[in-house]
């Protein structure tokens, strides 16, 4: 998933992955085990509230936050069964 669908499609084709529109980010985040975030924004995109909403059962998730400033809020680290790595 990328904010620019064409960029996502080109990369997905090159690597053999599937692509989805950005509007479906929460649906796919629910299904993902690992989420890599590299978003340019002034405020975190992934908040504790929206991450708690995508957690399903006891299965954990790993967030790799490559954004500066962070796109995964520091409070997300308090969510059970979740690991956050950031730069």
Image: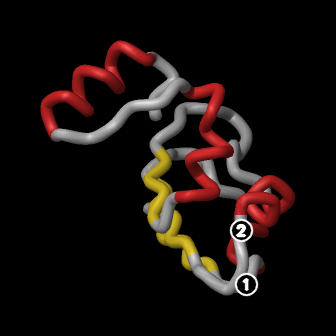
Side of 85 where 8 appears, left or right? left
Side of 54 where 68 appears, left or right? left
Do the numbered discs 2 and 1 sit on residues whose CB atoms are within 8 Å? yes
In the structure shown, which secondary structural element does the residue marked by tag 2 occupy?
A: loop
Residue on which disc 2 sits = 55
Outermost residue toward the right?
Answer: 49
Pick the front one: 21 or 69: 21
Mark 1 Cα within 10 Å, few/some/many (few <14, many 20+)? few
| 85, above or below 70, in the image | below
* Residue 68 image point, x, y percent: 51, 45
**Quadrant position of residue 45:** top right
* Residue 13 image point, x, y percent: 19, 28
* Residue at 58% in and 79% down: 60
| 42, above or below 66, in the image | above
Residue on which disc 1 sits = 80
* Residue at 32% in and 19% down: 7
Pick the front one: 5 or 46: 5
Side of 82 where 1 appears, left or right? left
Count of marks overlaid on the render: 2
Outermost residue toward the top?
Answer: 6
The answer, for residue 78, to whether it is visible in the render is yes
Mark 2 Cα within 10 Å, few/some/many (few <14, many 20+)? some
Outermost residue toward the left?
Answer: 14
Whichever of callouts 2 and 1 sits on the residue coming sooner in the sequence is: 2
The answer, for residue 86, to whether it is visible in the render is no
| 32, above or below 67, in the image | below
- For discs 2 and 1, the disc positioned in front in the rendered view: 2
Alpha carbons under labels 2 and 1: distance apart:
9 Å
């Amino acid at each position: 998933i990328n904010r620019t669908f064409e960029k996502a499609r080109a990369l997905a084709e090159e690597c053999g992955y599937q692509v989805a529109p950005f509007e479906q980010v929460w649906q796919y985040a629910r299904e993902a085990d690992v989420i890599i975030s590299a978003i340019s924004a002034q405020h975190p995109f992934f908040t504790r509230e929206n991450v708690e909403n995508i957690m399903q059962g006891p299965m954990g998730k790993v967030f790799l936050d490559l954004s500066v400033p962070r796109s995964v809020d520091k409070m997300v680290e308090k969510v059970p069964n979740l690991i956050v790595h950031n730069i």
